[in-house]
Every structure is written in structure tokens, then in C-alpha cells.
Image (tube, grey):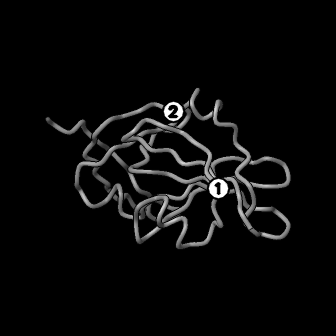
Amino acid sequence: MSLRAIVIDPEQRTVKAVETAATTADIRRLVGASGLSSFRIADHGTSFDYGWVNDVGLMDGKPIYGFKFDIAKDPIAGRCVFIGVDKETRENTDAATPIGFLLEHIIWLGLIVPEVFWEETEQGMRAIVTYERAKA
């Protein structure tokens, strides 16, 4: 079964739909990383869209191309893949976020050097991400 995924590539500054089986191996290939981390990005009524990223993209201290959304404070490091998840069955489904909407809200950061600091709060540990532009 082939699903519609959305790939955001901050190095190329592109947002495009791709067809994928949405297996873990496919998502790793599209992200370009062996380890993955995910976050929920959108609620579409019967499904959510989740973003999948390199699980150490922000933490390894190396320069990486990044972007962020104008409604969020933290950057996203490297390629990000959106896949839908059906709320009832929890099975993967087509990503439903419109590409035009993403393009309106993405801020391209270029090559950044991120740093992650951990802060202990009453609710547990919280990551604080800062970054600077990589020097040419």
C-alpha cells in the first residue's frame, strides 16, 4: 500500500509530496537517519499528521540545515517527513496537511549549529534548544 507523505528538506528548501509504504525503513530513508523521533503536528479530525526527524539532529552539535514553523520556537534539524495516523485504528494514512499551508509557515534557517540544554521542572525534564548560524 502506498501512502502520501510530505518531505521537508531544509538544505534544498523544498516541501514535496512523495509516495511511500511508510514503513520504519522507508521513513529512515526519507529522513536520512537511522534513529527517528516524532512529534504531532496537525489534527485533521479523523487523523493526525506526525513529523518524523533524525533523533539526534539537534543534539550532536554538528552543523545541520534547519527550519522552524512561525508558530513554534524550536528549530527542526534536517529533513522532516510527515505521515498521517488514523485516530481510531492508529494505522498510518496519507499526510493531510496542505503543502501550501506548510510553505506559508516555514522559516528556513540555513546551516545552524544547535545546542540542547536540559532543565528540570515540576513536570519533569524539558529540553531548551538554542542555535546559531554556522560560520562559512
Residue at 35% over, 57% down: 57
For residue 127, the mark is none
- The residue that mark 2 highlights is 106
> Which structural element holds mark 2?
strand
Q: Quadrant of residue 10?
A: top left
Labels 1 and 2: the sequence-earlier one: 1
Label 2 is placed on what type of residue? Ile
Q: Quadrant of residue 58?
A: bottom left
Residue at 54% over, 39% down: 15
In which quadrant of the rendered image does the C terminus lie? top left
As drawn, the residue found furthest toward the top would be 104
- Measuring from the top left, give residue 85's x and y in whole percent: 73, 61
In the picture, measured across the screen, residue 83 lies left or right of residue 31, that is: right
Label 1 is placed on what type of residue? Glu
In front of the other: 1 or 118: 1
- The residue that mark 1 highlights is 19
As drawn, the residue found furthest toward the left would be 136
- C-beta proximity under 8 Å, tags 1 and 2: no
Residue at 50% over, 44% down: 8
In front of the other: 129 or 4: 4
In the picture, measured across the screen, residue 28 lies left or right of residue 48, that is: left
Residue at 48% over, 67% down: 28
> Which structural element holds mark 1?
strand
- Measuring from the top left, give residue 113's x and y in whole percent: 25, 46
Instruction: Tell me how far mark 1 sits from mark 2, CA to CA.
Output: 22 Å
In the picture, measured across the screen, residue 110 lies left or right of residue 107, that is: left
In the picture, measured across the screen, residue 63 lies left or right of residue 28, that is: left
